[in-house]
Each structure stands twice: as structure tokens, then as C-alpha cells.
Amino acid sequence: MSDTALEAVLRRDRLVTAVALTLVAILAWGYVAWFGTISMPPVLTDTGMDMRMDGHSMASQPMDMRLSSSPWSVTDLLFLAAMWTTMMVGMMTPSAAPMILLYARVGRSAAAQGKPFASTAWFAAGYLLAWTGFALVATGAQWGLQQLALLGPMMQSTNRLLGGGILVAAGIYQFTPLKNACLGQCRAPLNFIQEHGGFRRDAAGSLRLGLLHGLYCVGCCWALMVLLFVGGVMNPVWIAGIVALVLVEKLAPAARWVSRGAGALLLGAGVWVLATA
């Protein structure tokens, strides 16, 4: 294959991968938006009448408000787990795109030389598997907080001590060596691949490599994701702000200073919230 033909194939491969990642993110965000607007069946009291809230049937209330007002069922938990998983996919796919595109580009080049790697889909699946694990933990945290009546209809903290504590914890974490180490792994895709044995030719190896990269990403961003409980899990503006911060941390030239600047702001906001609680 000529150099010109190979370059054309690589460009097409990057385009296909980029379009696929974009579609995944769009579908995930669409699901989250839909989740915030759906209604659930009426909740019946022991008298057989559907429970009312401010003069309106619970059937007209979004699911998040229903979950705040009634015991959770297994279906509710599964539904919330699906919501969290889809939201993590939508939030983290943009920041994972450089790594996945690199994998696809090198994989296509290796295939052209007769030495193919495992499909990029295996690597991406491993990455998303790590965030699926985080989503399950977040689902459990939400269940616990709502059992304690600490979350409002938008799944935001209604307790200033809790909200301030989360802000302070997230701010402090931005300065920790673990944060810096994980952020460094996320910012340098090629170095990450080289440090962990290179690209994999087998599907299981590619899946494990993607999972490892995802775990580093969770280690880098988990505290920022917990901030969803402060501004509201279903607050699109708050979600977009967190996504923007994650992208800047991973892509901006002065990532460490961006991370520490964000940490200082979060710490200051948390202290103020606690002081006025």
C-alpha cells in the first residue's frame, strides 16, 4: 500500500471513530435529558387513591421527585444505574476521544502492515467498563442520600453541611499526589500505552488496557463527578460545567495549574458554604 493510500485510510479511520464517539455522546446526553422529563405511574396509598403533591398527581411528577417521595424498588435502582452509566458515558467520551483515536490510528497502521491489533472497540469497552463501576457506586450513594432525605427533586444536596463538605473534599483532592499521577496518565495517551506494555493484539488484552486507562481516569475525575450531588445530577448547566473542567484539565497546556486553580475555588466555595450553614 502506498504512503498516499495509507494516509487516506488513516484519515477515514479517524473520521469513522470520531463520528462514532460523537454519536455515543449525543445519544447518552439525549437519554439523560429524556430521563429528567419522564413521568412514572401513580403511587397509590393504602386507601387506593393516588398520592397528591401540591394539588397534583404524583403521576405528573418526574421520576427523580417520585424517588424522593416513595421507597425504591429494584426497578428504580436499575433505572437509576442505567441513568448514571449513560451519563458517565456522555460526560467522559469527549475527554477519552484523543486516546481512542490514537488507538484507532495506530491500529489501522499496524493492520496495513499485516500486524493487526485487537479492535478499538475492545479498548473503548474497557474504558467505559471502569466508568460503569463508578456509576454503580454513585447509584448506591444516591440511594443512601435519598433515604436520609438529603437530596432534592433535581438530585442536589439540600443540606449545606453535606454540600459544603463535598466541595471541600473535591477541592482538597485536586492538590493530592494521586490526582496528579492519574491526571498525568490521562494527559499522555502514547506514554500510557508505552508504560503499560504497548498495544494489544488480543481482545482480552485490549479490554484490560482500556479498563486500566479508565481506572486512571476515574482516579483523576471521581471527585469532580461527586460534585453532581452539589449542583444537581439532573442540572444540565452544572453537568456541562463539570465536563468543561474535565476537558480543560486533560487538554490544556498548564493542566496542573488549571487543576490547582479549580481546587482552590472549590475549597473556598466549600468553606464559605460551611461557614454560612
Image (cartoon, rainbow, N blue to C red):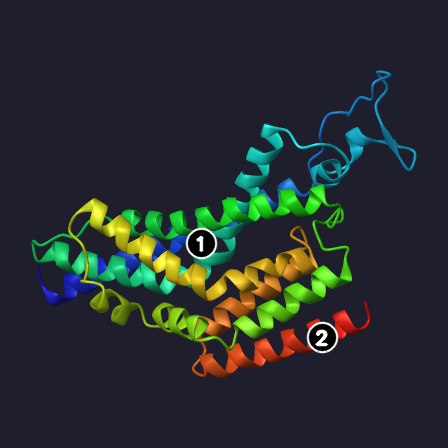
**Looking at the image, which residue is at 71% across and 30% down?**
40
Residue at the image position 32 percent from the left and 72 percent from the top: 188
The amino acid sitting under disc 1 is Thr
| Mark 2 or 1: the one toward you | 2
Residue at the outermost right position: 55
Mark closest to the chain's N terminus, 2 or 1: 1
Kind of residue indicated by mark 2: Val
- In percent of the image, x 84 and y 16: which residue is there? 48
Q: Quadrant of the N terminus?
A: bottom left
Snapshot quadrant of residue 165: bottom right
The residue that label 1 is drawn on is: 22
For mark 2, what is the residue?
Answer: 271
Q: Quarter of the image holding residue 218?
A: bottom left
Tag count: 2
* Residue 219 shown left or right of residue 47 in the figure: left
Say which quadrant the C terminus sits in: bottom right
Residue 62 vs residue 2: left or right? Answer: right
Please tell me whether mark 2 sits on a helix, a strand or a loop. helix
Most foreground residue, 183 or 20: 183
Residue 91 locus on image (x, y percent): 51, 56
User: Does dot 1 land on a helix, a strand or a loop?
Assistant: helix
Measured as percent of width and height from the top left, residue 227 is found at 62, 61
- Residue 71: % across, % down: 71, 32
Taking depth in this image into account, of 34 and 195 the one nearest to the observer is 195
Label 2 to label 1, Cα distance in Å? 38 Å
Most distant residue in the top direction: 48
Q: Residue visible at 83% across and 22% down?
A: 45
